[in-house]
Structure formats: C-alpha cells, structure tokens
C-alpha cells in the first residue's frame, strides 16, 4: 500500500481525514518497518513520540494490579499510536507490540504538536479519536462489572469483526492473531471461562475457530447474544 494514496480500513483515523490532511500527516516523521514482536512503546516509559500505522496491526497491553498482562485493544493500519503521551507529556499508559510486520511513521513530539497547531481539523480529529478510545474503555469497564461473560465475549467478537473482519465463504474471519489468554484479556474474564463460552458459540454454529483464528458465521445470532 502506498503511504499516501493507499486506502485505509473504513472507520480508521486516517480514513476519516480529508485527503490533503491525510497526506500531510503521512509526510511527517520518518518511515520505519518493524518485525513481529517488536515493542514500539512500553508502559511507564517517559518517551513522547507518536506513530502513524501505515500497514499491519499492533496489540495494546497493560499490567493489571495483580500482575497479569491484559490485552486492552488492537490497532490497525490508519490509526495513531502513542498520541496521548505526545500531547500531555506523561509516561506511557500501555505497551504496544507489533503483531506481524508493521510499517509506520515515527513522529517526534515537537513535530506532532507543530502539525496539530497548523492543522486545526487534524487536531480536532485527534481529540475525537482520543475521546472515542476513552468511551470504548469506559463501556468495557461497565460491561466487566455488570454483564455475564457470554455477552461480553459476543460484544468483543462483534467489535473485532467490524474492525478487522474479512469476508470469506464461512463468514467474517477476524484477521487478528489472538491467543486464548489475549482473548480472555480483551473480554476481562478467566481463560477457562472464555474457552467454555467460545466452545458453546462454536457448537451453536455462531462462530468457527481454528488456530488463533475466529470466524463469525452467524452475525445476527451473535448480535442477539450481545444485546443481552
């Protein structure tokens, strides 16, 4: 994909920008390519640069109070990474790791801030993006405290299918390489419980599973479960 003319996933940050603003943002910083497993940002570090993801996707994780690693989110091409620390100068709140090969633009804090000051439309879009991430995190906290695991898993699978799903003969395959512990972290439940609920979805014909792959076979039924 061309960093300037290629398409980005619908709903991604870059896809929502006007073409001139998108081209300007993609011209910032330096082009980098990273191998699978490379840590781009580490929780607690005082760094302040940001990344614009051009291809590939990353996993966002953080350490829970009991010392476990929780998968907070998945970000794909067209998204900003690390923009919060670039804006407020505070330490990183999460670790970001490449899941597969990633191409990105590394943008220093001064360059990022100058660009936002000169492009109010992009600054507004960044603020909206941060707000959307906060709302999503808030919804998850509410779900964790009030919804059964079956509903939470259905909602997470629908979100993953919407953001990362690709149509296939059996349904929408979630194009994210997720381990069982990572999926459990996204759902906010114990791994055995998530495994049991996922098996129930599979037996009901709602999803199909393979090695680190999930396909949403019956979206309508999954939505019915998610609605509680």
Image: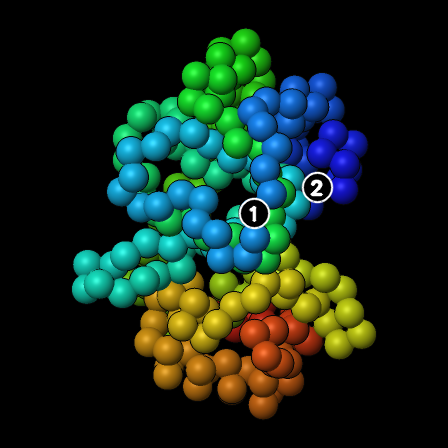
Q: Is residue 13 visible?
A: no
Nearer to the camera, 150 or 133: 133
Left or right position of 85 against 119: left
Q: Earlier in the sequence, mark 2 or mark 1?
A: 2
**Rendered residue at 50%/81% (across/down):** 198
Left or right position of 41 against 100: left
- Mark 2 sits on what residue? 8
Label 1 secondary element: strand
Closer to the eye: label 2 or 1: 1
- Image quadrant where residue 41 sits: top left
- Mark 1 sits on what residue? 34
**Rendered residue at 76%/36% (across/down):** 2
Nearer to the camera, 43 or 196: 43
**Rendered residue at 48%/39% (across/down):** 81
Q: Is residue 19 above or below residue 1?
A: above
Residue 141 image offset from top left, x and y in percent: 32, 55
Q: Is residue 198 visible?
A: yes
């Amino acid at each position: 994909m061309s960093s300037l003319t290629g398409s980005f996933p619908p709903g991604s940050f870059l896809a929502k920008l006007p073409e001139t603003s998108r081209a300007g943002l993609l011209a910032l910083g330096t082009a980098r390519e990273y191998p699978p497993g490379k840590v781009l940002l580490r929780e607690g570090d005082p760094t302040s640069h940001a990344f614009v993801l051009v291809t590939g996707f990353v996993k966002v994780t953080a350490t829970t109070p009991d010392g476990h690693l929780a998968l907070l989110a998945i970000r794909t091409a067209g998204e900003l990474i690390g923009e919060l620390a670039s804006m407020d100068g505070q330490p990183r709140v999460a670790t970001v790791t490449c899941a597969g090969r990633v191409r990105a633009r590394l943008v220093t804090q001064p360059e990022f801030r100058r660009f936002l000051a000169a492009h109010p439309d992009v600054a507004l879009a960044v603020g909206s993006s941060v707000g959307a991430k906060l709302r999503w995190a808030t919804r998850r906290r509410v779900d964790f405290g009030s919804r059964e695991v079956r509903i939470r898993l259905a909602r997470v699978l629908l979100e993953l299918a919407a953001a990362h799903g690709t149509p296939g003969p059996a349904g929408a395959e979630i194009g994210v390489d997720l381990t069982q512990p990572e999926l459990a972290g996204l759902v906010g439940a114990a791994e055995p419980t998530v495994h049991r609920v996922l098996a129930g979805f599979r037996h009901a014909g709602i999803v199909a599973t393979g090695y680190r792959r999930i396909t949403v076979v019956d979206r309508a039924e999954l939505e019915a479960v998610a609605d509680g």
